[in-house]
Image: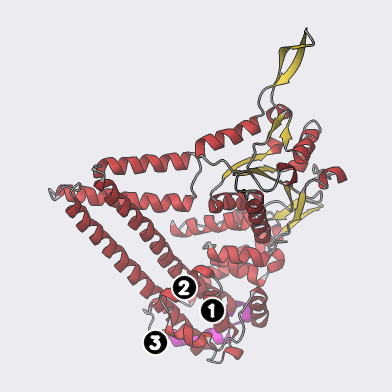
């Protein structure tokens, strides 16, 4: 299975294990709540899906990488105590509370989540002294003498021996007590994730054309060579930052993230061509409507005569630009929703006679606590910070105008003005995104023909706009007539293999 399927299966198991009966007890006994064992190559997102599940399900998460810990941190430190048995005193050894179990209790205290996931990574790569402890943990849900609290589901992860020479195989006794999910690197699954999370267009276009380079882990005469999903995403983020700051990208940078010399060289070449084609064909000017008609026609003629890989790279550049415009509108919508919610809470606080300034300080402190305790995602944190900053500036503006923000009518006027401004900004961005999409569709029709059956690039743009949930939702709210008309002629929904076929046709 791929990592998305594994995530869905873990979430389903969590719901089953955490069902309660009429008395409030768990329907499934702890003895029948088998730990889940994820076995898969490194860097495909095993830890990331644990964080996503915890946020989406509203439960706690404690994660440990066992190669960083000792036997003592797992089972606790020994200490001598005196016990009386049958009238006689004995000196025996007991252990302090396991650091890992203590972390679970701390998480429950900190977050008020009585249920959660205890995630143990690299479980089959531990030292020989810790290996028996891990087996006991999987078999009995205990570290030493300390049991994992009820309501906490156990998920462990490990690497197959071919990826890690320190990895050990589990015996039948252990495997008979866990649910083993074997996860494989899946380029289609990752490309869906990448498309939804604004991964650099050069990365997406390259992997559509070269899916065999998505994941690599091998040992050759020159040592270990590997490329992972984590490497592609981290490289994407750095490239976007370099471009925004107009910094030079060296060839060495690619090799730092793609530790396969051949793949690093091929992608470096693709990235530079991708950037050059965007400038040569003036894709942003085409989409924003500022290009002259003669220059536009010359570019179309050149592209018709270009090699298929050049054509496909230019089209992906266009798709990325349109995708980013729609992504900006989606981001503004989410930020507006958070701002509207907080303004409503401020109005409610005023009804309780709370001062606006005090409320703002309370919200900032609440956000700080959530960030410190890792209770919200980075994206959620940014949206809340932007909203609180906007509210703070509006309060200061009222005070400069000698208005009292603690008066309900003043706050009502400010709330209405802010919401109107946000709505108008969103509407402008949505109109711009749709205008870019319309120009892109027309440009591809003019360049390669209006017949969808003979124009794989037009099909590729249409499919890329309609097969991603966020963009599909956006286009339902802000319909694009041109896209809607063309989409009627796509008989079947396009999937990743259809996209791959378009790439093969172009090549």
Q: Quadrant of the N terminus?
A: bottom right
- Is any part of residue 314 visible from this angle? no
Measured Cα–Cα span from mark 1 to mark 2: 9 Å
Disc on the earlier residue, 1 or 3: 3
Span colored in magenta:
296-311
In front: 344, or 462? 344
Q: Residue at x 70, y 38 (%)?
A: 66
Residue lying at the far top in this picture: please name it: 88
Magenta span: helix, strand or loop, mainly?
Answer: helix
Residue beneath label 1, please?
A: 461
Q: Residue at x 31, y 40 (%)?
A: 361
Measured Cα–Cα span from mark 1 to mark 3: 22 Å
Instruction: Mark 1: give few (<14), some (14-19) or many (20+) Cα within 10 Å.
Output: many
- Is any part of residue 280 visible from this angle? yes
Residue 366 on image: x %, y %: 39, 41
Question: In the visual, does 291 lie left or right of 26?
Answer: left
Measured Cα–Cα span from mark 2 to mark 3: 20 Å
Question: Which label number is shown at residue 293?
Answer: 3
Residue 284 on image: x %, y %: 43, 74
Residue 167 placement: quadrant = top right
Residue 294 placement: quadrant = bottom left
Question: Which label number is shown at residue 322?
Answer: 2
Residue 17 on image: x %, y %: 66, 49
Color style of the picture: secondary structure
Question: In the visual, does 433 lie left or right of 126?
Answer: left
């Amino acid at each position: 299975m791929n990592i998305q399927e594994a995530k869905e299966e873990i979430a389903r198991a969590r719901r089953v294990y955490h069902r309660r009966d009429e008395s409030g007890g768990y329907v499934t006994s702890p003895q029948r709540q088998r730990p889940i064992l994820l076995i898969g190559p490194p860097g495909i997102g095993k830890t990331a899906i644990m964080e996503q599940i915890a946020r989406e399900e509203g439960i706690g998460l404690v994660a440990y990488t066992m190669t960083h810990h000792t036997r003592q941190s797992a089972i606790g430190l020994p200490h001598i105590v005196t016990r009386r048995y049958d009238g006689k005193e004995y000196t025996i050894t007991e252990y302090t509370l396991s650091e890992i179990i203590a972390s679970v209790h701390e998480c429950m205290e900190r977050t008020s989540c009585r249920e959660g996931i205890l995630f143990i990574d690299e479980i089959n790569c531990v030292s020989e002294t810790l290996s028996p402890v891990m087996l006991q943990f999987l078999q009995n849900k205990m570290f030493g003498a300390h049991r994992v609290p009820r309501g906490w589901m156990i998920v462990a992860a490990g690497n197959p021996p071919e990826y890690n020479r320190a990895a050990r195989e589990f015996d039948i006794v252990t495997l008979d007590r866990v649910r083993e999910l074997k996860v494989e690197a899946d380029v289609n699954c990752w490309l869906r994730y990448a498309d939804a999370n604004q991964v650099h267009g050069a990365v997406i276009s390259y992997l559509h054309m070269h899916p065999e380079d998505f994941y690599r882990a091998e040992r050759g005469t020159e040592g270990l060579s590997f490329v992972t999903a984590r490497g592609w995403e981290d490289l994407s983020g750095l490239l976007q930052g370099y471009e925004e700051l107009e910094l030079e990208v060296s060839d060495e940078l690619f090799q730092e993230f793609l530790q396969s010399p051949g793949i690093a060289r091929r992608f470096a070449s693709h990235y530079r061509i991708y950037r050059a084609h965007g400038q040569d064909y003036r894709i942003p000017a085409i989409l924003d409507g500022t290009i002259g008609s003669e220059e536009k026609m010359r570019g179309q003629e050149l592209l018709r005569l270009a090699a298929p890989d050049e054509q496909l790279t230019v089209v992906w550049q266009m798709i990325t630009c349109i995708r980013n415009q729609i992504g900006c509108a989606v981001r503004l919508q989410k930020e507006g929703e958070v701002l509207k919610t907080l303004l409503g809470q401020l109005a409610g606080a005023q009804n309780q006679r709370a001062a606006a300034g005090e409320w703002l300080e309370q919200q900032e402190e609440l956000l700080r606590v959530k960030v410190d305790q890792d209770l919200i995602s980075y994206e959620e944190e940014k949206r809340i910070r932007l909203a609180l900053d906007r509210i703070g500036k509006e309060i200061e503006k009222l005070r400069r105008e000698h208005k009292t923000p603690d008066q309900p009518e003043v706050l009502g006027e400010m709330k209405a003005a802010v919401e109107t401004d946000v709505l108008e900004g969103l509407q402008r961005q949505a109109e711009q995104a749709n205008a870019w999409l319309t120009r892109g569709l027309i440009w591809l029709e003019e360049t390669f023909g209006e017949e969808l059956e003979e124009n794989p690039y037009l099909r590729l743009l249409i499919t890329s706009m309609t097969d991603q949930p966020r963009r599909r939702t956006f286009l339902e709210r802000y319909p694009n007539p041109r896209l809607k008309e063309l989409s009627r002629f796509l008989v079947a929904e396009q999937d990743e293999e259809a996209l791959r076929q378009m790439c093969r046709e172009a090549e």
